Image: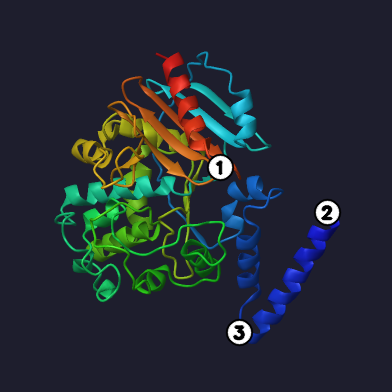
């Protein structure tokens, strides 16, 4: 089987080289395309998720010269996680109790300093940045049409959608999010990213709606890219520059994060942020503390409350959604989380004073019951620390 797989990859490489010669691709383009096609392969996924900067265009966000914000260590007993860690291919976990590290562990050959891919956890970071910019006056209201700030979206499926609509994943835009379908919109987008295309052009190329904006919730990752377009249109600055200035540097992260970018240097804001697990935990602790961290109010407390409330038009009894944040259907007040494919989480339980940051390489993340198992595990940890 291994010999067959190696042979198959060689054939794929030969085909790619032949095609590249016909369309003028560069060798780097071929490498990125091959990286996309093998990104989640069982024998590569763990290494890939800790080294996306080897595979894709990327830009580092300077962390500044300030000191690293402290995370004191106060180890506490937590439930045995052995089976869950193995089943879910966990690579890193940091548990904070009242702002101190109660538990920290790394698996599958990864290291604490690895800058791990966030996937859709990055969406919650962009929501935080948007809240800061609204407070700064750069954006007037989330009830303004996105075309007020991005005229290029006039005449597209986003024409008539408000910032609130895209924040809540209720744009109504037709978008196939199936990662297992080669021809899905999400995978077409991945190939645009790998080949150095323009994410802005991809978003502007979406012309069809399934429903009116605001009518119903549907998870559409490209909505988050449109939020990035709004931010850039409102400020005349890049998300990378703004994220570094408004969030990364004030938070005192231990390592400079980086964004995967398209070929034009535009940040892959819907899933391309990379940082150590401890720094994801810092972000969660800031939200637990109503946006206050490292001696200052970084995200407005009002935005923290508003963005993590279940305001999106989700189906009755289903998982709920705020402004790029998730809330379980049965969540008690103060429990919410950021969530990314393949098992990335920043779980916040304000009543318990607990934050849990998890990175994983879980190829079975979509199987029935996996999310429920993860949530139950987080709740068991939180309950044990009260």
User: Looking at this view, is 328 or 317 the one in front?
Assistant: 317
SS for callout 3? helix
| Residue 369 visible in the snapshot | yes
- Furthest toward the right, the residue is 3
**Dot placed on the residue nearer the N-terminal end, 1 or 2:** 2
225 relative position to 17: left or right: left
> What x and y, as percent, mark residue 289?
29, 29
Per the image, the residue denoted by label 2 is 1
Relative side of 212 to 118, left or right: left
User: Image height check: is 346 above or below 148?
Assistant: above
Q: Residues within 10 Å of mark 3 (few under 14, many from 20)?
A: few
Residue 194: x percent and y percent? 55, 66
The answer to whether residue 2 is left or right of residue 213 is: right
Question: What residue is shown with label 3?
Answer: 23
Q: Which of marks 3 and 1 is nearer the N terminus?
A: 3
Residue pictured at 42% horizontal, 68% vertical: 199
Q: What element carries label 1?
A: loop
At horizontal 21% and vertical 35% (from top left) the residue drawn is: 301
Image coordinates for residue 323, horizontal then vertical, percent:
28, 46
Classify residue 266 by image quadrant. Answer: bottom left
Q: Nearer the viewer, mark 1 or mark 2?
A: 1
Looking at the figure, which quarter contains the N terminus?
bottom right
Quadrant location of the C terminus in the rendered image: top left
Is the C-beta separation of discs 3 and 2 under 8 Å? no
């Amino acid at each position: 089987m291994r010999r067959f797989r190696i042979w198959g990859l060689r054939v794929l490489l030969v085909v790619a080289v032949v095609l590249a010669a016909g369309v003028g691709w560069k060798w780097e383009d071929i490498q990125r395309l091959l990286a996309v096609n093998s990104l989640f392969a069982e024998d590569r996924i763990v290494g890939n998720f800790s080294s996306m900067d080897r595979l894709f265009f990327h830009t580092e966000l300077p962390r500044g010269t300030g000191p690293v914000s402290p995370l004191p260590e106060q180890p506490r007993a937590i439930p045995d996680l052995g089976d869950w860690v193995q089943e879910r291919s966990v690579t890193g976990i940091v548990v904070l109790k009242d702002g101190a590290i109660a538990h920290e562990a790394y698996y599958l050959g990864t290291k604490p300093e690895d800058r791990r891919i966030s996937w859709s956890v990055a969406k919650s970071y962009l929501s935080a940045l948007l809240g800061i910019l609204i407070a700064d006056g750069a954006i007037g209201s989330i009830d303004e049409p996105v075309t007020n700030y991005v005229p290029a979206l006039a005449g597209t499926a986003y024409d008539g959608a408000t910032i609130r609509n895209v924040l809540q994943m209720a744009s109504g835009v037709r978008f196939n999010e199936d990662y297992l379908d080669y021809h899905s919109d999400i995978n077409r987008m991945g190939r645009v990213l790998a080949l150095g295309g323009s994410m802005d052009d991809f978003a502007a190329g979406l012309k069809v709606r399934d429903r009116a904006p605001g009518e119903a919730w549907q998870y559409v990752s490209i909505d988050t890219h449109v939020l990035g377009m709004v931010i850039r249109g409102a400020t005349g600055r890049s998300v990378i520059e703004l994220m570094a200035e408004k969030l990364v540097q004030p938070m005192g992260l231990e390592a400079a994060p980086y964004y995967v970018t398209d070929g034009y240097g535009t940040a892959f804001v819907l899933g391309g942020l990379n940082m150590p697990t401890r720094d994801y935990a810092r972000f969660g602790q800031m939200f637990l503390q109503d946006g206050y961290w490292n001696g200052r109010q970084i995200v407005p407390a009002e935005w923290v409350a508003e963005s993590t409330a279940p305001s999106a038009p989700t189906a009755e009894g289903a998982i709920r959604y705020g402004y790029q944040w998730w809330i379980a259907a049965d969540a008690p007040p103060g429990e919410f989380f950021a969530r990314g494919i393949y098992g990335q989480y920043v779980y916040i339980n304000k009543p318990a004073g607990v934050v849990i940051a998890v990175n994983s390489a879980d190829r079975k993340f979509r199987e029935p019951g996996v999310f429920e198992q993860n949530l139950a595990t987080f709740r068991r940890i939180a309950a044990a620390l009260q």
